[in-house]
Amino acid sequence: MAVSIAEMILLGLLVDWVFRKLRLPGLLGMLLLGVLFGPYVLDLLEPGFLAASSDLRMIALIIILLRAGFELSRDVLNRVGVQALLMSFVPGMLEGGTIALLGPRFLPLTHLESAMLGFIVAAVSPAVVVPMMIHFIERRMGAKKGIPTMILAAASLDDVVAIVIFSVFLGFYTGSSENVLVKFAGIPLSIIAGIGAGLLIGWLLLRLFEKFNPRATKRTMIVIGVSILLVRFEHLLAGVGLPFAALLAVMATGFIILEKREHMAHEISSKLGKLWVFASIMLFTLVGAQVDVSLAWSTGLAGLALIVCGLIARSMGVMLSLIGSPLNGPERLFAVVSYWPKATVQAAMGAVPLMAMKKAGMQTAAGEVILAVSVLSIVFTAPLGALAIKWVGERALASDPGADRAALDAVSDSR
């Protein structure tokens, strides 16, 4: 495992540098590196490294979501709250619903199977979107209208909605006796519980830090450790049927520390920025290693066409959500393309229907199609979305020279 980590660090830094020199997002190089070295192409990664993939990816995701929390200014959220709320469910509902309706026309799936696929694919990728939004926030691009912050907040809620709706359709399909209204009620409950727990834990951590005054490095380690336990807590609560959005709790923890002790928040964010250099390599190479390219293309053009139809519906949903906002045309286009990338959720959830079908003793052909299209959505949208975000963002977002000095100092320290 140690050798595989060393290889990914060295080669990850190299491909990141090469892709940036080519004016391409570095994460594309890391994704391709993971695909190449993964078990479906050259198979050069040690089994122990792949076995730890889920935990390593989760830790990396926690680090970037903590950084997102430390960028969520209350003043900006107050300005963009309505649009962020609409973007948290309107685009995903339209995309998932479109795939559910059109799925049987493109693929050998029923409407119910297509609905499961639709809400797996509908989840936007925080692994791709969050670091790119933080990059724009650091450069104060789009800061005046709070555009990257709006997308940060909305994308996090978008995942919660998509995953819960997927679980409802999966329950229907496998004959679960769970009450549908209870499952749908779990969406707002999980959001409220996650945010509430994060705010409380953030406040308790502040009291702890003020009393014992540990150095910034130790504060950062404590925040990461508590965040990992929050994710574990979500799994424990899920086992007894209680809704809880741990990743929202992670972001809320960062938010309350920023709100109450801005300088402390910038110090911790600075340390997280340094850790992200390593974590990003682990996250994107391991997501790439999950991708079976031959499986992705097994659905052919039909699978790709269905994904494109879903993206068109999602894009329309973003535009509808932004009606009445102060964003101009190019800025709205930036919001649209920021909602394209798929990766994290699809890598984690794509095989769930197949496993559920096997467990229930059902035919698995539909599960294999769902997995193939989920993987194809990563192959197609992750690079396309990352490129589009970079290209459109550089041209559409205006730079705000009135940057917060403390935040910029923390960003400088984190490099």
Image: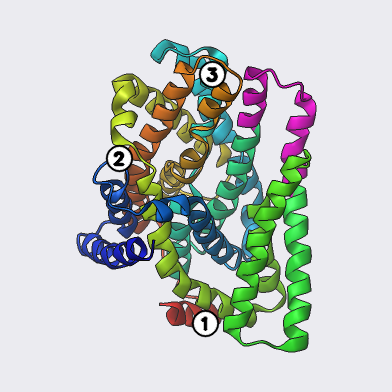
Q: Which residues are magenta?
A: 165-191
Three-letter residue code for mark 3: Glu
- Whether residues under marks 2 and 3 lie with C-beta atoms below 8 angstroms apart, the answer is no
Residue 119 magenta-highlighted: no
Looking at the rendering, in which quadrant would you find the C terminus?
Answer: bottom left
In the displayed structure, would residue 143 be above or below residue 268? above
* Residue linked to disc 3: 113
Which is in the foreground here, disc 2 or disc 3? Answer: 2
Mark 1, residues whose alpha carbon is within 10 Å: few (<14), some, or many (≥20)? few
- Can you give x and y, in whole percent of width and height, for residue 214 in the image? 66, 87
Residue 190 magenta-highlighted: yes
Q: Mark 3 or 1 closer to N-term?
A: 3
Three-letter residue code for mark 2: Tyr
Secondary structure beneath label 1: helix
Which is in the foreground here, disc 3 or disc 1? Answer: 3
- Whether residues under marks 3 and 1 lie with C-beta atoms below 8 angstroms apart, the answer is no
Q: Mark 2 or 3 closer to N-term?
A: 2
Three-letter residue code for mark 1: Arg
Residue 353 vs residue 415, the one in the foreground: 353
**Image quadrant where residue 398 sits:** bottom left
**Image quadrant where residue 293 sits:** top left
Which is in the foreground here, disc 1 or disc 2? Answer: 2
* Residue linked to disc 1: 405
Mark 3, residues whose alpha carbon is within 10 Å: few (<14), some, or many (≥20)? many
- Whether residues under marks 1 and 2 lie with C-beta atoms below 8 angstroms apart, the answer is no
Q: Which numbered marker is on residue 40?
A: 2
* Whether residue 265 can be seen here: no
